[in-house]
Image (tube, rainbow, N blue to C red):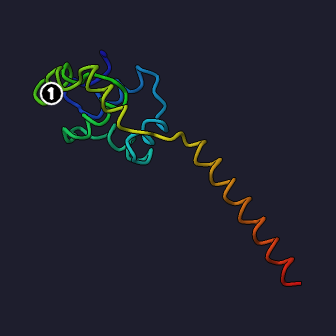
Amino acid sequence: MSTTNKSHHGQLLEYAVRSRGISLTDLAFNIKVNRRTVYNWFESPFLKKEIIYRVGMSIHHDFSVEFPQYFTSDDFTAEWIRIQNSQLSLVEPGEWRDKYIDLLERYNTLLYTLSQLHK
């Protein structure tokens, strides 16, 4: 972590995310923000504790090492992460696309049927 500023919150966040190989698109989706917001966080020298926590929970990273002033390792225990993940039923982006396409196809079929009735 030699190229990262130890007091720059955004850099510490980015290092943790990228070192885990997490897709920024997936991260943004999981914490319900857009990718631009994630990039803005990486540029920010100071972040709210809640943002750091949300990212840590999403990527399963214990930020108590980088931010001992905000967290203890108990805040990021494996059990807490397991409980959080079981409560969140996150749908993959592809599933939404498939549902949308299915809905469009059914709508088009309905429109076609209605147009045939009115002839």
Q: Which residue is drawn at 38% across and 27% down?
A: 17
Measuring 18% from the left and 22% from the top, which residue is drawn there? 64
Give the farthest residue toward the top: 2
Q: Which residue lies furthest to the front in this view?
A: 117
Q: Is residue 29 left or right of residue 42?
A: right
Residue 72's quadrant in the figure?
A: top left
In percent of width and height, residue 112 lies at 82, 71
Which quadrant does the N terminus fall into?
A: top left
* Of the pair 36 and 74, the residue shown nearer to us: 74
Residue 30: give x, y in percent of width and height. Answer: 42, 39
**Position of 102 relative to 5 (above/below):** below
Residue drawn at 49 percent across, 38 percent down: 25
Q: Position of residue 35 (x, y in %)?
A: 45, 44
Pointer 1: what residue?
71
Residue 79 drawn above or below residue 57: above
Question: Mark 1: which amino acid?
Answer: Phe
In the figure, 101 relative to 61: above or below?
below
Residue at the right extreme? 119
Dot 1: element = loop
x, y percent for residue 20: 42, 20
Looking at the picture, tell me which residue is in the foreground, 15 or 56: 56
Is 79 left, or right, of 109 in this rendering? left
Q: In which quarter of the image is residue 83?
A: top left
Q: Which residue lies furthest to the left in this view?
A: 69
Q: Which residue is drawn at 25% across and 35% down?
A: 52
Res 71 → quadrant: top left
Could you tell me which quadrant the C terminus lies in? bottom right
Q: Total marks drawn?
A: 1
- Which class describes the residues within 10 Å of circle 1: few (<14), some (14-19), or many (20+)? some
